[in-house]
Image (spheres, rainbow, N blue to C red):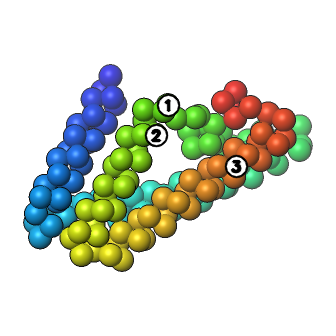
C-alpha cells in the first residue's frame, strides 16, 4: 500500500508540473521536468543494460542445467512481467506530455535524448521478450 501511495503521489506531482509547464513554458516547472527527464534517461540506460545482462544470464542458465541464474529478480521485474493496459496508457501520456513540455520550454536536446532512451529501453525489453517466446516459453511464467 505504501508503494502504491508513493507512486500515486509521484504521478500527481509530475502531472501538476506538466500542467504548469504547459501553462507557462518559461517557468521553473519546465526545469523540474527537465531534471526528471534526465533522471529517467539514466534509469532507462541502467534498465536497458540490466535487462540485457539478466537476459543473457538467464539464457546461459537455460543452456547449462548446473548453472543457476544470478539476477532472476531483475529479470522478472524488467522483462518477465507484462504491464497492465491502464499503466501503459498512463506511461504513454506522461512520456508524450513530458516531451511536448520540454519542446515548448525550449529544451530540445533533453526532449530528444529522453525520447531516444525511452524508445531504446522499450526495444531492448521487447527484443528479450520476443526471444523468450521464440524459445517456446511464456515470459509471464518466469
Q: Is mark 2 on a helix, strand or loop?
A: helix
Say which residue appears at 65% left-offset and 49% top-offset: 126
| First along the sequence among labels 3 and 2 | 2
Judged from this view, the residue extending furthest toward the top is 1
State how far apart marks 3 and 1 are (Cα): 18 Å
Instruction: Give coordinates of residue 6: x percent, y percent.
Output: 27, 35
Label pair 3/2, CB-CB below 8 angstroms: no
| First along the sequence among labels 3 and 1 | 1
Which corner quadrant holds the N terminus? top left
Label pair 3/1, CB-CB below 8 angstroms: no
Which corner quadrant holds the C terminus? top right
Mark 2, Cα crowd under 10 Å, few <14 / some 14-19 / many 20+, is: few
In the image, 87 versus 140, the foreground residue is: 87
Say which residue appears at 32% left-offset and 75% top-offset: 108
Mark 3, Cα crowd under 10 Å, few <14 / some 14-19 / many 20+, is: many
Mark 1, Cα crowd under 10 Å, few <14 / some 14-19 / many 20+, is: few
Which label sits in the foreground, 3 or 2?
2
Q: What element carries label 3?
A: helix
Q: Is residue 99 left or right of residue 14?
A: right
Instruction: Give coordinates of residue 133: x percent, y percent.
Output: 77, 39
Name the residue tied to disc 3: 128
In the image, 18 versus 125, the foreground residue is: 18
User: Residue 88 got which mark?
Assistant: 2
Residue 27 appears in the picture as rendered: yes
Amino acid at each position: 500500500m505504501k508503494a502504491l501511495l508513493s507512486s500515486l503521489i509521484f504521478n500527481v506531482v509530475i502531472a501538476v508540473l506538466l500542467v504548469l509547464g504547459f501553462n507557462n513554458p518559461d517557468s521553473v516547472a519546465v526545469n523540474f521536468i527537465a531534471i526528471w527527464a534526465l533522471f529517467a534517461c539514466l534509469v532507462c540506460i541502467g534498465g536497458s543494460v540490466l535487462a540485457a545482462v539478466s537476459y543473457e544470464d538467464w539464457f546461459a542458465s537455460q543452456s547449462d542445467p548446473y548453472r543457476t541464474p544470478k539476477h532472476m529478480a531483475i529479470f522478472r521485474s524488467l522483462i518477465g512481467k507484462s504491464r497492465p493496459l491502464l499503466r501503459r496508457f498512463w506511461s504513454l501520456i506522461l512520456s508524450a506530455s513530458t516531451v511536448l513540455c520540454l519542446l515548448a520550454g525550449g529544451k530540445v536536446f533533453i526532449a530528444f535524448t529522453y525520447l531516444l532512451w525511452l524508445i531504446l529501453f522499450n526495444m531492448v525489453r521487447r527484443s528479450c521478450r520476443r526471444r523468450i517466446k521464440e524459445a517456446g516459453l511464456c515470459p509471464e511464467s518466469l
